[in-house]
Amino acid sequence: MGADAYAPDAAVRRVSKARLKQHRQYLQWKMDVMGRRMRCEARVVPVCTGYGSELHHVLSRSQGGALMDEANVMVVCRWCHHWIEHHPREAKTLGYKKSPWKGPFPNE
């Protein structure tokens, strides 16, 4: 048996058509949101550049946050986004991150 015996006949689609369509809709929605809200909304001193270049999901999608919910996103600059992700307690205190859990948990 040669090496070609296990080669696929056709290329495997890495992303389904439905997922590709959802991704395109998300990119269009993201550009619309960022077009209306151009300034960084976090304004973390001293790292903020002032120009909003990314979307930050306040309640992360993995924790139940909606992908395309304008109330769940903040337009932030790259440096503020980095700060938010690396300082979760401070970000939560400032309202930049939310937890899906309700109730008394330690360190929450």
Image (cartoon, rainbow, N blue to C red):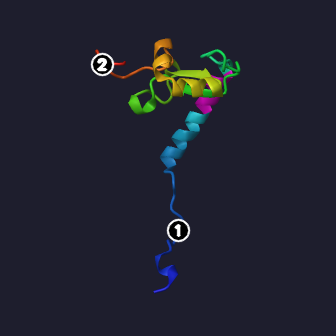
Please determine whether, in this image, residue 91 is positioned above or below residue 68.
above
Q: Earlier in the sequence, mark 2 or mark 1?
A: 1
- Three-letter amino acid code at the position of disc 1: Ala
- Three-letter amino acid code at the position of disc 2: Phe
Q: Which residue is mark 2?
A: 105
From the viewer's side, name the closer residue of 5 and 93: 93
Which residue range is magenta in the image?
Answer: 28-35
Q: Is residue 55 magenta?
A: no
For this view, does 69 lie left or right of residue 42? left
From the viewer's perspective, is the residue at label 2 or at label 1 nearer?
2
Percent across and percent down for residue 54 are 62, 28
For this view, does 18 lie left or right of residue 38? left
Please determine whether, in this image, residue 30 is positioned above or below residue 91.
below
* Residue at figure coordinates x 51%, y 51% from the top left: 15
Task: Locate the C terminus and report the quarter of the image it occupies.
Answer: top left
Say which mark, if any, is on residue 10.
Answer: 1
Please determine whether, in this image, residue 67 is positioned above or below residue 42.
below
Which secondary structure type mostly characterizes the magenta part of the structure? helix
Percent across and percent down for residue 28 are 61, 33
Residue at disc 1, secondary structure: loop
